[in-house]
Image: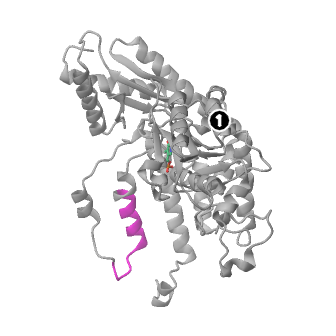
Amino acid sequence: MRTAKRDARLELSVDEMTEIGYKVVDAIVEHTATQASKKPVSIATREEMDRMFLEEAPEKASDLNQVFEFVQKQVLETSSIVSHPRSYSFVPGPSNYVSVMADTLATGYNIFSGGWAASPAAAELEIVTIGWLLKIFGFPVKRGGGIFTSGGSMANLTAITTARRVKCPGDFSKAVIYLSDQAHSSNIKAIRVLGFSKDQIRIIPTDLEFKLSLNKLKNAIAKDRLSGLQPFCLVATAGTTNTGTVDPLNELANICRKEKIWFHIDGAYGGAAILSENGKKLLRGIEKADSLTVDPHKWFYQPYESGCLLVRNAKWLKATFTEKPEYLRDVEGNTSEINFYDHGIQLTRRFRALKFYMSIKTFGLGSFRKAITYNIELAEQVEAVLRKSSNWEVISPATLAVINFRFNPIQLNLSEKKLDALNQYISGKAVESREVLLVTTLLQKQVVLRMCLINPRTTMDDITFTLKLCEKFAAEKYPGIN
Ligand SMILES: *Cc1c(COP(=O)(O)O)cnc(C)c1O
C-alpha cells in the first residue's frame, strides 16, 4: 500500500519498481521479436484519438499497472512501426535493441551530458565516439570535433550557425547561402530560424540525375559577388532523401576552397553508407567538408533521437557556442575536458553517446558494414527485379538503398496523367491495407513510388509480397493485367 507521504516523494517501492520494470522490458522484447508479423501502418483521426485520450489532468493517483496496460494497448501498439521490414517510406528507423537498452540506462540514471564536471565519463564517451566518426569519415581526428544532437535538423542548424559565426562575424546582412532544390527542408528551416531573409538564399537547380549543377552554382556565386554580396556557405547533400543522390562533392569542395565558402555536407541520410565499399566510392570527397551532418537514428540503426554534427576544427564550435554565465564558473575545467554545452545549442542534454558506444562495442563496426552493404545490395536486386518485369518502370536507379519506380505496364501504354493517378491509387490502397508503408514522391513532376531500404531485416520476400500487393491493387483499376 502506498502512503500519502510516499506518494509525495514520487517514489515506488523496490517491488513495484521491479514489477513495472519487468513488464516494460517484456513489452519491448515481445514487440521487437514479433513486429514483423504486425502491420506497419497505423491510421487514426483526431476525433478517434480525442475519444480515446482526452481528459483533464487527474488530481488523484491511479494504479500503475492499469496506466501501463492502457498505454501499451492504446498508444504503443497503435503507432506505426518504423522499424518494420515492410516500412519503406520516408526514412525508416530500423533501430537496434542494444541501443534501446542503452537509452533506457541513460534515462534511468538520468545522466546530465552537458558538462565535464557533472559526468566526465559521459563526456569522454562522446569524445571517443565522435572520434570514431571523425576517423570513419576521414576528418582530422585530433583537430576535428563534433557533437551529438537530437537529429539531422538540429545538426544542420548547428552547422549553419557555426558557418555564419566563422565566415561572417558581426554583420551577415550581405551573406548568401547556396543549396540545391533537392536539399532537405531542414536546411531551409535552419536558415530561416537564423534570421536570413529570402533574398539571401539561392536554390540551385539540379541536373537530370538530381545532382547540384556546378555550372549554375558558379554562375550564382559570380553574380552575387558582382552585386556586392558575400557568398558564405554551400550546403551539399550526400544522399538526398528523395533519390539517394550524392552531389559532386570533390568539385564542390574545389569551388568552396577557391571562393572561401564554408562547405557543409548534409549526410543525414546517406553518410552512414561510407561503411560499405560501394558507399565509400559514392561518397568520395565527403572528407573535404568543413562540417558534416550525419544522423545515427537513420542508417546507423540507432533509436530516436540521435543526430550528429562533425567539424574539421573543434574550435569553431567552441567559438560559436561558448557563453559564460556566472553560475557555471566553477565547472569550466581545462580545455581538453570538453563541456558539450559549449559545442552546441543545448545546455542540459541527454546522454546520446551511450547508445552509439554500446551498440558499436557489442556488434562491432564490421556488423554495421555488413548491414549497410546488405541494404545497398538489396536495393540493387529490387532494381533488377523491376527492370525484368513488363509492369514496372524504374524512375531513379537504386542509389544508397533508395529506389524510385512506378507501375507502368507496357501493354496499357498509359498517359502521364493516368500513370500519376494509377500510382497514387496503388500507394493509397497499399497504405490503407496497412500491410506496407509505401508512399509516393514527385520526381520531375511524375508521381512515383519510393522505397528506402535501410532496414537490415527487410528481405526479398518482403519485396515480392509488396510488389504483388501493388499489382493486385492495380488490377482493380485495370483488370486483365497481371
Ligand atoms: C532526415 C534528414 C534530415 C533531418 O534529420 P532529422 O533527424 O529528421 O531531424 C536532414 N537532411 C537529410 C538529407 C535527411 O534525410
Q: Vertical placement of 415 versus 50: above or below?
A: above
At which x and y percent is residue 126? 70, 57
Residue 467 quadrant = top left
**Magenta range:** 58-73
Residue 3 to residue 462: above or below: below
In this rendering, position of residue 66 left or right of residue 413? right
Question: Percent x, y for residue 453?
Answer: 49, 32
Residue 167 against residue 66 in the figure, above or below: above
Rendered residue at 73%/42% (across/down): 139
Which of the 4 image quadrants contains residue 134? top right
Determine the main secondary structure of the stretch shown in magenta: helix
Q: Position of residue 9 (x, y in %)?
A: 52, 85
Q: Residue at x 66, y 56 (%)?
A: 354
Q: Nearer the viewer, residue 265 or 199?
A: 199
The C terminus sits in image quarter:
top left
Colour pattern: one colour
Q: Within 10 angstroms of label 1, few (less than 14), some, or many (20 or more) residues?
A: many
Q: Residue 377: x, y in percent?
A: 56, 24
- Relative to 473, is 290 on the left or the right? right
Q: What amino acid is found at the position of numbered circle 1 in the picture?
A: Ala
Q: Depth check: 365 or 421 in front?
A: 421
Classify 122 as above or below 455.
below
Residue placed under numbered mark 1 in the picture: 253
Determine whether, in the image, residue 63 is placed left or right of residue 237: left
Q: Residue at x 22, y 21 (%)?
A: 475
Residue at the (31%, 26%) spot, across then down: 470
